[in-house]
Image: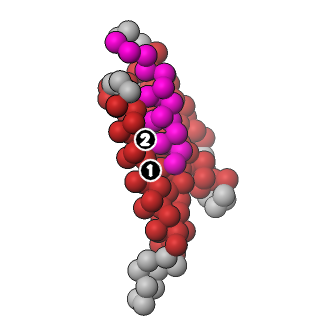
Amino acid sequence: MESQLKPVLLNLLAAFVGAIGQYLYKVGAKKISSESYINWEIVIGAILFCAVMVLFIWAYKIGGNISVTYPVYSLTFLFGMGLGIVVDKELWNVTQFVGAGMIIAGIFVVVQFAPK
């Protein structure tokens, strides 16, 4: 089996790009009106999600195993949570961070103990 390092890193990048796209959707959604359902934030968000798909395809093209690489994309939830907390000053609690730690631990187990 080929090394999963590069495909995992590509999915990590995809997770970050996807979180930014999701954040732009949130910002753009606040600007939607009855006259306009589209704005630059939504357009850029959609472009970023297309970039995420390109990164997925690239990861699989170079030998990424979906059972190893795709779970890494779940970090997009944590990146999104971070954007909400840091940029939008959303409220958070310890339970959220415990859950985030569980996601990180799960990803570590999946990637670390994948068949070599």
Query: What secondary structure predominates along the stretch shown in magenta?
Result: helix
Q: Is residue 13 visible?
A: yes
- The residue drawn where x is 47% and y is 55% is 48
Residue 90 horizontal/vertical position (percent): 62, 58
Q: Quadrant of the C terminus?
A: top left
**Closer to the camera, 77 or 100?**
77
Visual colour scheme: secondary structure
In the picture, measured across the screen, residue 53 lies left or right of residue 98, that is left
Does residue 106 appear to the left or right of 88 in the view shown? Answer: left
What is the residue that sits farthest to the bottom in this orientation? 35
Location of mark 1 (residue) = 51
Determine the secondary structure under disc 1.
helix
Q: Is residue 103 visible?
A: no
**Start-end of magenta stretch:** 1-17
Amino acid beneath label 2: Leu
Residue at the spot 58% in from the left edge and 38% down from the top edge: 97
Is 39 left, or right, of 94 in this rendering?
left
Tag 2 residue: 55
- Where does residue 76 sit, x and y in percent of width and height? 48, 44
**Is 112 or 99 nearer to us in this picture?**
112
Three-letter amino acid code of the residue under disc 1: Ala
At label 1, counting other C-alpha atoms closer than 10 Å, the crowd grade (few under 14, some 14-19, many 20 or more) is some
Labelled pair 1, 2 in contact (Cβ < 8 Å): yes
Q: Is residue 4 above or below residue 86?
A: above
Local packing at callout 2 (Cα closer than 10 Å; few below 14, some 14-19, many 20+) is many
- Image coordinates of residue 75 in percent, x first then y, are 49, 38
